[in-house]
Amino acid sequence: MAENNVTNILVVGIGGQGVMTATEILAEAAIALGHDVKKTEVAGMAQRGGVVSSHLRFGPKVLSPQIMPGTADLLVAFEAAEGMRWCHYLKPGGLVLMNTARLVPPVVDLGLYDYPADPLAAIRERGFRVQAFDAMAIALELGDMRLGNTVMLGAMADHLPFPAAVLLDAILKRFRARKPQMVEINQKAFEAGRAADKATQHEEVTA
Amino acid sequence: MGMPPARVNFLLFLSEISMAAAMPAPSQSRLLLSGNEAVARAVWEAGCKVAAAYPGTPSTEMLEVISTYPDIYAEWSVNEKVSLEVAIGAAFAGSRAFCAMKHVGMNVASDALMTLTLTGVAGGLVIAIADDVGLSSSQNEQDSRFWGRFAHLPVFEPADSQEAYEMTRAAFELSEKHQVPVILRMTTRINHVKGLVTVGARSMPADGSFHKDPSRWVMTPAAAGKRIPLMFERDKTLRAAAETSPLNFVETGTDTRVGFVASGPAWMHVRESFPHAPALKLGLSCPVPVEKIRAFAATVEKLVIVEEVEPLVEMELKAAGIECLGKDILPRQGELSPNVLKPAIARLLGEPVPEQVATPAPVFPRPPTMCVACPHLGVYYTLAQIKNLTISGDIGCYTLGAGHPWNALDTTISMGASMGIALGLDKGRAAADQDKRILAVIGDSTFLHMGMQGLLDIVYNGGNVTVLLLDNRAVGMTGGQGNPGSGKGIHGDARPRVDFARLVESLGVKRERIHVVDPYQLPVLFKTIREEIKIPEVSVIITDQPCVLIDDYKKQQPYEVIADKCTGCGNCVDVGCPAIHVTRREKVVKPSGKEVELQFVRIETSACTGCSLCVQPCAPDAIVPALPTQPMRLVKH
């Protein structure tokens, strides 16, 4: 937490991955606890396969909506290279929760640029901690790729300044209101994400 | 305002715009709203009767959300000028009216604005202009606060969603009190940022009516001449109002070495960066409350003006003899975020500048791409194959045709400009360019917005231009809003749909020079373009497949690549579809001695929607329908 008691969480990925929805749910959880909240996206033309970065700031009083480089408490990357692109937003020694899925853009397929060989190692080289897991595989195992962002939310749950149950509640409320038949599977996805986080926490310690 | 207890969940409903229509959240609700959503709520609460806009990032959601509220007329207009005129008409009729646009929209609408300031209004009129500070999706970064000076209109500048809500309500009051249209200047960092907003109750203004008064509403030279002095009088009244407005206030501070004057999102950045400094907030920033600032300046050692983008307040203060700093120490482009402000002020104070420890890792760019199966892919694949073309482009998804792998778009300036620029490229061609063919590419909505007049000009003046009119039945770039080309209104309801072939024929294009082509039929498209560019007169080729993001688009069975059959020719890669991925590259020397790089591919079947554009140029027939993987695909009755 920053000295002014504002928590900075940066969620990044590609348009269509559910980055903005995940941040919106995080915001709702923070609001439920009585925090002031600001959420901002730099999503330019995200619908066209561009980068999405969603800034969430919450605390007693939030002024600027933007997280500045070097000040994020937590970086959640829905895609490996995006984790690398945004890691400098973290505080020194900060934590990246990373989906290992690699989404290759046309500029790489066209041979104009290379996809980084090992984004995870590149982030660690900069002194940040990384916990990486294949959220897409977990979602597919549960039967639907769209569960990916709930898996990612589950992975975040034990890194927030509030109980995991508050976040789970914010997710399930949303589904209860719109798609009650999806409540159970989302709860499973959340727990699977949480478990993946626990498993990789261990890896991080022993790495 | 009795509400069932179930509505405690309203926060969750809000991100689903469609839910708002059923029942707007009750007064005193605390909602997580974007600036655009906050303005929409305030417009509804203010009892506004008519709201109009043309979509444009970052302004689009204002009208989208307004259209979900009950008892308010909302429309997508064909362009910003018409939207402003619709709002003006409603305000003349005595009703409250609202109009929203992105910054460049006001360039189009300003013809009406510059005389509207003379007539003034009867019902309150608020014009929200969304500046794209930081250029997230625009062709320039112009500062709309200039319009306040140019047109002698008051300008409000909210700093977050709560203020966007409050200032919209205040703007209607001010507008009616002084019978003056009011500008609400927003920026991307207001429009698209979500924050908590406490909303109020709806209150309807007294019903007005249209009062016949030619001296007021008919701006002949004689009538306008009498209105100009009244406008100057109004300036004085508004300046006095700005001096005493509670929206312009001082926050005292203990560190008086630097005092700040700031507005819009920059205010929050100043408060974040310098919590102990005195600061003066400009909410009603035009006319500038010069005397209030003069008094504030006397309380600090140095005065710094923090405004995005141009030094407007700064210049006016300097002209008034108030010593201050601004763009001499701060950038004139982009957002004035804490990481810009802190080092600039440290330098000013001679303090050590915080080291930039956080530098980004080198990662490939991820520019926006066209969608999988986008009908424009066929168009640009074809254009990339034709040599000796100069292609005049326009504003929309198809501007991306300038990028890889097509590199098939040569100019982009403003909405509809592809037409006039193509004519100018034709008439102004140098001797060296005599063999060049001039082609213009424009989308359906952009054509109806500002392109029709340009085509008429090409016809009238005998231009030799081939026009590609990409009709995808949507304003694609902003999210598929309806327009007269889609035949759908703002609520998705059926409206008369323009017949483009008949329209361009009426403008004077010869019937035999008009072709309607399916952009997924590459051989036909190629042949048609090749033939038409050779004919020295205006032709119009209309492509007629819908945007893949709208309901009209029907997915087909996806394709896959038989790896053994792929020869690595790379023809399919040239289509530019994001579902095609290169799995392996291999350099080989051809019998001719030329070295080529082979690109072996796969198709991301889960993303492919079966448009067949990559299948057509595949010589070895390596791309075939994928075996159904989902049970639902097996059921075909």
Image: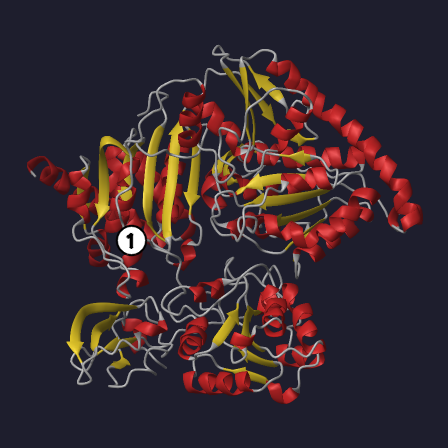
Task: Please indicate whether residue A62 sits to the left or right of residue B500 in the image.
Answer: left
Q: Position of residue B339 (x, y in %)?
A: 40, 31
Above or below — where is B361 with respect to B611?
above
Q: Chain of mark 1?
A: B
Q: Say above or below: A103 vs B176.
A: below
Q: Which residue is labeled 1 in the image?
A: B364
Q: Within the image, what quadrant is residue B607 found in?
A: bottom left
User: In this view, which residue lies farthest toward the bottom?
Assistant: B512
**Observer able to see residue A133:** yes
For residue B448, what is the image quadrant? bottom right
**Is residue A25 or residue B260 the one in the foreground?**
B260
Q: B184 or B308: which is nearer to us?
A: B308
Image point (87%, 49%), residue name: B217
Q: Is residue B597 above or below residue B84?
A: below
Q: How many marks?
A: 1
Judged left or right of residue B119, residue B31 is left
Percent position of residue B510, x then y: 66, 86
